[in-house]
Image: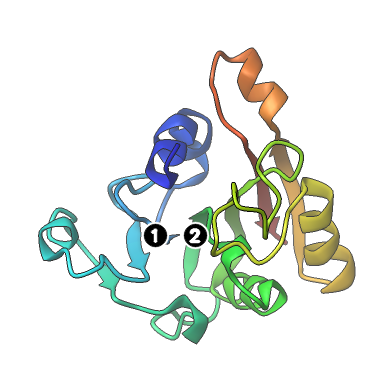
């Protein structure tokens, strides 16, 4: 299953959080909503793929460099699917992503669930993953350890999606900026 498949599968559950001006970090082949501002590492030289998106987009942007294109408290939402696990410094990313959210804005994070996805560093896992994630780890990092001004709005895990007839190994945490 690819990241774009995850976004397509999860869109019916998550699009309601993507109202107003927002960004899809690591949008790949499928934005969460068409109006999202796409921010993508690169398209591996595929300019045709990059050209399929209309509107404001930042392609070729290295997310390690933060989000300098956005002001503090500018966005109504920020969506990220299968991106945070690729960073050595997820704490810094969560702080930066919170910085650009308006008060009342939503941060929708989709990550591979540590109980359902192959462990980081094993041959079966994605080689870019730096660590394994569980919802409790993400929530603890954001709210307890970093003290970010966020509250959890919803949490969805693979058993919930299985009950809906969907095959996914991801989990979702939706935060609201206080």
Left/right placement of residue 128 relative to residue 94 reads left
Residue 91 figure quarter: bottom right
Relative to the observer, which residue lies in front, 148 or 42? 42
Quarter the N terminus occupies: top left
Residue 162 figure quarter: top right
Q: In this view, does 10 lie above or below 55?
A: above
Q: Which mark is residue 21?
A: 1
Q: How crowded is mark 1: few (under 14 residues within 10 Å), some or many (20 or more)?
A: some
Relative to the observer, which residue lies in front, 122 or 96? 122
Q: Residues within 10 Å of mark 2 (few under 14, many from 20)?
A: many
Image point (53%, 61%), residue name: 83
Left/right placement of residue 131 relative to residue 27 reads right
Q: In this view, does 57 lie above or below 119?
A: below
Image point (48%, 86%), residue name: 65
x, y (%) of residue 127?
A: 55, 61
Identify residue for label 2.
76
Helix, strand or loop for disc 2: strand
Mark 1 and mark 2 in contact (Cβ < 8 Å)? yes
x, y (%) of residue 8?
A: 39, 34
Image point (61%, 35%), residue name: 169
Quarter the C terminus occupies: bottom right
């Amino acid at each position: 299953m690819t990241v774009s498949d995850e976004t397509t599968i999860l869109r019916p559950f998550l699009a309601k959080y993507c109202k107003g001006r927002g960004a899809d970090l690591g949008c790949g082949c499928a934005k969460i909503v068409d109006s999202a501002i796409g921010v993508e590492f690169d398209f591996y030289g595929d300019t045709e793929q990059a050209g399929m998106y209309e509107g404001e987009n930042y392609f070729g942007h290295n997310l390690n460099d933060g989000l300098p294109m956005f002001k503090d408290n500018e966005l109504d939402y920020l969506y990220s699917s299968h991106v945070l696990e690729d960073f050595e410094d997820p704490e810094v990313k969560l702080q930066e992503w919170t910085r650009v959210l308006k008060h009342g804005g939503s941060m929708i994070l989709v990550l591979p669930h540590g109980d359902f996805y192959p462990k980081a560093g094993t041959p079966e896992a994605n080689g870019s993953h730096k660590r394994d994630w569980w919802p409790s780890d993400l929530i603890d990092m954001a709210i307890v350890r970093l003290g970010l001004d966020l509250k959890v709005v919803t949490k969805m895990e693979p058993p919930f999606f299985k009950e809906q007839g969907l095959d996914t190994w991801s989990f979702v945490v939706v935060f609201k900026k206080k």
